[in-house]
Amino acid sequence: MSRPDQHKHGLVPGLVKGMATTARTMTSHAHTQEYPDVKPELPPRSRGVIALLAENCTSCMLCARECPDWCIYIDSHKETIPAGPEGGRDRQQNVLDRFAIDFSLCMYCGICIEVCPFDALFWSPEFEYAETDIRDMLHEKDRLGEWMATVPPPPATDPGAQ
Amino acid sequence: MSHDVVEVVLRAVCVLAAFLVLPLVVGQTEHKVMAHMQGRLGPMYPGGFHGWAQLVADGVKFAQKEDIVPIAADKRVFRLAPALGIVAYLLALAVIPLDAHVFGANVDDGLIWAIAVTGIGTVGTLMAGWSSGNKYALIGAMRSAAQLLSYELPLILSCASFAIAAGSLSLVGIAHAWTPWWLLWQLPGAIVFLVAATAELQRVPFDAPVADSEVVMGPYTEYTGLRFAFFLLAEYAGIVVMSLLLAVLYLGGWTGPFDGYLGWLWTLLKGFLFALIIIWMRVSWPRLREDQLQRVAWLGLVPLALLQLAITAVGVVLTA
Ligand code: SF4
Ligand code: SF4
């Protein structure tokens, strides 16, 4: 019936201890963050939303291909830059027409950001972009670019990091 | 003659007002106290100041909900059940005196009346469980009936102790007979009363009949909207009734400084103290298992209540 630990902490001391704990919690400060009134302080590495620095993007498609959800949509075309007056060859350049991330599919794994060789994608702690319709969660290049302003400076490396 | 009628109507209206306001006060206190005991803030928005209107908003929400009666339910009984709990506690509240002259109705055997009608509330629970046509509701109702059977005895025994000590069954008489010496003399009885009352109200740690992790919401599982709200109101009205009753029996009701004109306030404050303890227990303690619950009643409370009766009897004989 009675386990050995019941002898150590009897019923009544246990009950009193429970009441003491709740009383102590009541007199100390509540942990509640009053979110809409007080903005939360998020750590710099928070995965809020993915921002795009379109100037850096070369339309290499690596992110779109590595994305486990296939929720990155990229359209681009090649433009030819004619050779200069000094001669030489015409050069070709990728122009980004469309870059969109469907945040209703995105699982915030961050693979796209890790895989981008040109530092065009960044995490932003911004998280207030809820929509009432799931189809409105597909955000295009312009919107992704607006979030660049909210990207924090990269945190200092840990002591001892190489 | 007409003067009497006016007085009766006036007293009835006051009791009804108290019945509608006091449970909300207790409920709001529970919202806030429980939140802070758990390190939260609780409701903050309704009404502007620290969410004081939360329960009003809840009431509006309940009133808007669809009133669903299950096909398998025994419909008339199902519809009637919520009323029973409400009426029971309303009748009990009517006889509890806040002051020597502030009460709904002066019943000579007020104590017996109060204890008798509060038991009716459980019949409502039983009806709800039986008529719902739901196995969880039925199990919950059976548990609640078993609980009433085992806890009503210590409750009545402890009440008997107060009555013997005062030599009266009238609540006004008991409060008049009170002396500070009761605080020690009747302490075991008060503890028994508090525990048994908590059990009869089906509150933590005696909430096995409505244990959400075992039987969903027990007898109230199938209820929605206003009928469900009535059960909640009955629960909090029950806390009010039991707390005020204990305040009158054990703490001398309106006895206190300036009790000439502030007596009613003293009764309310003392009752509020017990309501706070009931809330505090809910936050601090886990739920008792069904067999532990019976064990506490028969092996703990009944002997303690009998002991209290013996102590009271000895005290009365010695001081007589
Ligand atoms: S975070 Fe992951 S799921 Fe979201 S777009 Fe990037 S790769 Fe795809
Ligand atoms: S991996 Fe980087 S550079 Fe390549 S398409 Fe994606 S965002 Fe643009």
Image: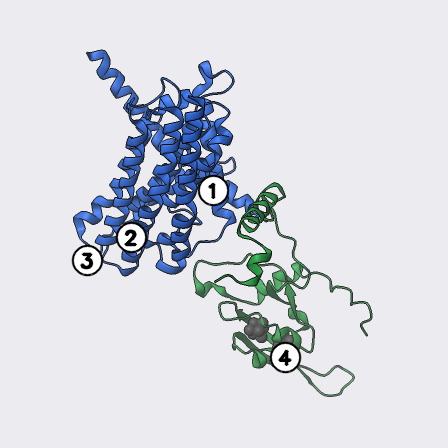
Chain colours: A green, B blue
- Quadrant in the picture for the N terminus of chain B: top left
State ligand 2's quadrant. Answer: bottom right
Graded by Cα atoms within 10 Å as few (under 14), some (14 to 19) or many (20 or more), the crowding at tag 3 reads: few
How far apart are the alpha carbons under marks 3 and 1?
36 Å
- Quadrant in the picture for the C terminus of chain B: top left
Q: Which of marks 1 and 4 is in front?
A: 1
The tag earlier along the polypeptide, 2 or 1, is: 2
| Mark 3 touches mark 2? (CB < 8 Å) | no
Mark 3 belongs to which amino acid? Ile
How far apart are the alpha carbons under marks 2 and 1?
23 Å
Q: Mark 2 lies on which chain?
A: B
| Mark 3 lies on residue | B71
| Mark 1 lies on residue | B279
- Element under disc 2: helix
The tag earlier along the polypeptide, 3 or 1, is: 3
Q: Which of marks 3 and 4 is in front?
A: 3
**Which residue is located at x 19 percent, y 48 percent?**
B77
The percent coordinates of residue B4 (x first, y second) are 23, 14
Mark 2 belongs to which amino acid? Ala
Q: Which of marks 2 and 4 is in front?
A: 2
Graded by Cα atoms within 10 Å as few (under 14), some (14 to 19) or many (20 or more), the crowding at tag 1 reads: many
Mark 4 belongs to which amino acid? Asn
Residue B56 visible, this angle: yes
| Mark 2 lies on residue | B141
